[in-house]
Amino acid sequence: MDIDQYKALTRKKPLKKVPRAKPLPKATQKYLEAEETLFQELEEHRIGYRRKFQFESTKNWRFDFYIVKLNLLIEI
């Protein structure tokens, strides 16, 4: 059944496909440079951290860095 037949029989417009979630934007060069700079600083000062930290919950939140001792989340 094509669209015209569907409209004629049901008097409704066909459903539009809507994306469920907006895709994440691509990382820019400035972002990549800032992340690399922070990574180098944390390594240089030997600060305990985790990269790309994600909570173990239903939320899909992810942070760029997690400083363990201070319980500090960093998003660039």
Image: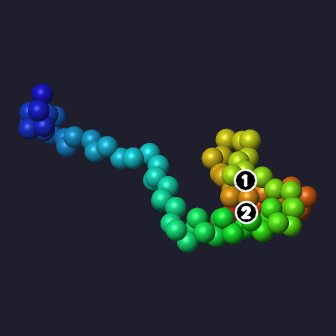
Question: At 69% from the left edge and 69% from the top edge, which residue is drawn?
Answer: 37
Q: Nearer the viewer, residue 18 or 33?
A: 33
Residue 71, horizontal then vertical, whole percent: 86, 58
Question: At 86% from the left edge and 61% from the top edge, which residue is drawn?
Answer: 47
Q: Is residue 33 visible?
A: yes
The C terminus, quarter of image: bottom right
Is label 1 in a helix, a strand or a loop? strand
Q: Nearer the viewer, residue 67 or 14?
A: 67
Q: Are marks 1 and 2 in contact (CB under 8 Å)?
A: yes
Residue 15, horizontal then vertical, whole percent: 27, 41
Residue 9, horizontal then vertical, whole percent: 11, 32
Figure check: 70 above or below 56:
below
Residue 75, horizontal then vertical, whole percent: 68, 64
Question: At 47% from the left edge and 49% from the top edge, which residue is drawn?
Answer: 21
Q: Residue under label 2, please give it.
A: 39
What amino acid type should be assigned to the residue bearing mark 1? Arg
Q: Is residue 71 visible?
A: no
What amino acid type should be assigned to the residue bearing mark 2? Phe
Figure check: 36 above or below 1:
below
Q: Is residue 2 left or right of residue 53?
A: left
Query: Few, some or many C-alpha atoms within 10 Å of disc 1 (few <14, some 14-19, many ≥20)?
Result: some
Question: At 65% from the left edge and 51% from the top edge, which residue is drawn?
Answer: 61
Query: Few, some or many C-alpha atoms within 10 Å of disc 2 (few <14, some 14-19, many ≥20)?
Result: some
Q: Residue under label 1, please give it.
A: 51
- Mark 1 vs mark 2, CA separation in Å: 9 Å
View extreme (front): residue: 44
Q: Earlier in the sequence, mark 1 or mark 2?
A: 2
